[in-house]
Amino acid sequence: MESCWQLLPQSLFFLHLLLLPIFAEGATRVYYLGICEVEWNYAPTGKNIITGRSIKDDPEASTFLQSGKDRVGSTYKKSVYKQYSDSTYTREIPKPAWLGFLGPIIRAEVGDTITVHLKNFANRPHTVHPHGVFYKKDSEGSLYPDMSSQDHKKDDAVPPGGNHTYTWTVPEDHSPVADDPTCLTWVYHSHTDAPKDIASGLIGPLLTCKEGALTGTSQRRHDVDLDFFLMFSVIDENLSWHLDENIALFCTDPESVDKEDEEFQVSNRMHAINGYVYGNLPEMTMCAGDHVAWHLFGMGSETDVHTAFFHGQTLTIRGHRSDVASLFPATFVTADMIPSSTGRWLLSCQVNNHLQAGMEAVYEVRQCSQKTPESSINGTVRKYYIAAKEVQWNYGPSGLDQSTGKSLQEPGSSSSSIAPGRIGGTYWKAKYVEYTDSTFRVEKQRSEEEMHLGILGPVIKAEVGDTVLVTFANKASWPFSIQPHGVLYGKKWEGTLYHDGTFEIYCQTSNHYQSGMKARYSVSKCGKGTPAPDPQYEEVRTHYIMAQEVEWDYSPDRSWELEHHNISGQESYGNQFLSNENGLLGSKYKKAIYREYTDGTFRIPKNRTIDEEHLGILGPFIWAEVGDVLNIVFKNNATQTYSIHAHGVLERNDGQVEAAKPGDIVTYRWDVPERSGPGPNDSVCVSWVYYSMVDPVKDMYSGLIGPLKVCRKGALGSDGKRKGINREFALLFLVFDENLSWYLEENVKTYAHGNQSKINLQDEEFVESNKMHAINGKLYANLPGLTMHQGDWVNWYLLGMGQELDVHTVHFHAETFIYRNGKSYRADVVDLFPGTFEMVEMVVGNPGTWLLHCHVSDHIHGGMEALYRVLPRQGMERVLLKIVPRIDNNSLPIKSTLIAFFLCSITIYHYFVILFQKQCP
């Protein structure tokens, strides 16, 4: 018998399905898209607009834009989406110049149907696949093995000269929620081989809005004055389907080109905004006081971590004020701006090498009328005297690694940059230093509370309404300035030329941790204020967990991978990681994993249920409520020393995690105070992880990691599942670097097939082959168990760990979800970074087998893909029919029938909500 919590989402879901056809009648918006091949110039002016220099005179710009015997230059052949007026595809509809090579803007609002008639004029198969809208299998536009019928595969690859009609809708469960902006930013793109298709140019913006935001069937919004759509992407022309053509067309000596040459590949990576570099994006113009919506998104590979910085203005993003938007591959941001400072302003990516490579544009704010918003600046004038001063800065003045007590020059330590034969830890630096007055003679001494600032300049403080007056002196030997973020300034002030009681804080990114990005902090009882009472812990939950060594296969079945790419294993992207020939190890590795046992004898392993099958390499899913105590009895049955350390809980070990040597048993106590659980604006449960902390980098890559969830009091059933939720899944997105595993040498001996003497552990190809782009330790749709039923309420606990390359944008095909970040927002992509953990909620409604993957291009090709299955639920309609009173259609007019049905539905809705509140904690 299902509980009321389980019935609620299912019943409301089917109620929604029944009501949707009645109350969701919107416009049908028709688009005729053609895929055409064009020549595209990333810098059509021949100049770096930001500096005014010609390309040939600019050493940075010429690296990418100067053609030559083995350089393509600024012009490339690309495939792009164009919009036409009708099915004859003879009259192209013009688009704003600032869209660049992006396809036309597709707009719709809740209740609308989008009909896309696609004609392929290119020389290879392509598709159009959307984000953020509802579609059936015949309109997904994504090529991968999904067990659907041939009739539902015609959308997967539209051949040259062919056409296909895609139908997408914007139902209520895909609409912007209350805390979202009026319109949400999405994209559409070709998806036969998404990384190559997008690099070739096939991508465009899509906008879905709340009901009433669009004026009739037109494209115009009535709630803003202007919409701008910008894609920040390092467009890798090496991935383009047209690479060979571009070499033949634009290199003066095509035969001299080595496509594997690193410098050649670098020259083909265009750091572009909408396909323009170095300020060549046609200028975006607006008036002071306009309501401007910026629709920003990133696409690309591991390098595509972008910070879009708007000089001169501020933005509102998800209720927060900023002047920078963070973007990653398939991250979609909607930002509102009401510009007030007039002038031509720089818009750029703040990542240093992206800025140098030309990811910058200009927008202009004009004084068009008297509607410029007035700012009330009538507060205090706060004066600061700051100089740029050259100093000798020592990064490690104590000479010790403070977390281990060892010398930074100790042989074999991770602090190799400070070892003999290197520059060491001391460098000449320029530093902002505060002075007492405009004579710049007396430095202002830092207080004890400011000593932590280190190399940072002084903290500049102000309140709303204040004016900050900074007098700046440059005492250094290079030209410098001061440029602020987050305040209002005019053009002339911009500053831009176009152990006991001791704990550790560290960067979770593995290679940053190894390189010393960590510090220690102390917490003391200072006697200030009334101390908080000690929390009362009630429930003690005990888990018996063993570290054991196993043979792990990342990809036991390659059939999906090979069918997906429709090629032989030798040509597959996966061959680099899964082949065990030519000195590569293949898909199998010795690993250490956490597994749960029934009791402290550690004789009987606790078998995983069908609901836990998806966990893969992860340890058991540990769960707790606020006020609980977790008692972890850990046995180390491996050959290395290991431990268990958890995020988010209070470990009773004075900041030190006790290690278990091989054969040892150690007991850990984790308290779960209020601060470990969800905050007032969080979901009912939040996600954390646990892992071995002896060497957190090598231990994790060896396999020792697992999920932990902490929920509000009373939210969990006796089985640990959240009440009212049908399925819960924990997924770790991690590039397992087997080169950093404790077992690398053993794996070489075991899996090199007698060729271990020929293997060079530093060989670039060998090193890359051991980086497994995994979801819970499985590649290329090998992860089982992601099965649910239509109408299920599903929680996804998504975990990110690893190195710099572990920037993951997790995309769910066919479904959207709600995530909470202070408020609730709708999305279909989640951003994950090392040490970040997200929980999203989804009510699944689209039966089928769907792709779940990281949207970073390198990771798609590397196999970071899984399938989730939504099964049609049989019998739920009958549940509702038993509850809904029968209506005799012969005795009531149709209109009255609909009214009666609506009233009954509202009654049912309130009945379930009341039942939910009364009977379910």
Image: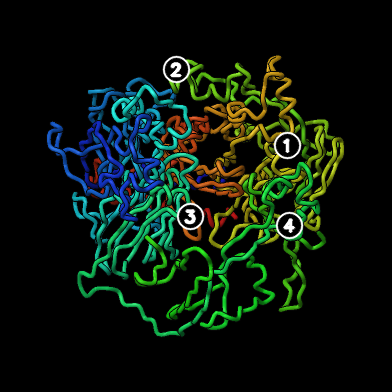
Within 10 Å of the Cα at label 1, are there few (<14), some (14-19), or many (20+) other Cα atoms? many
Between 280 and 15, the residue placed more toward the observer is 280
Q: Residue at x 47, y 68 (%)?
A: 482
Q: Secondary structure at mark 3?
A: helix
The CA distance from mark 4 to mark 1 is 21 Å
The CA distance from mark 2 to mark 3 is 53 Å
- Residue pointed to by mark 2: 567
Within 10 Å of the Cα at label 4, are there few (<14), some (14-19), or many (20+) other Cα atoms? some
Q: Secondary structure at mark 2?
A: loop
Q: Earlier in the sequence, mark 2 or mark 3?
A: 2
Q: Nearer the viewer, mark 1 or mark 2?
A: 2
Against 784, residue 919 (above or below) is below
The CA distance from mark 4 to mark 2 is 51 Å
Q: Nearer the viewer, mark 3 or mark 1?
A: 1
Q: Nearer the viewer, mark 3 or mark 4?
A: 4
Q: Secondary structure at mark 4?
A: strand
- Residue pointed to by mark 1: 594
| Disc sitting over residue 913 in the figure | 3
Using the rendered image of the protein, determine whether residue 175 is visible from the camera's viewpoint.
yes
The CA distance from mark 3 to mark 4 is 36 Å
Between 571 and 34, the residue placed more toward the observer is 571
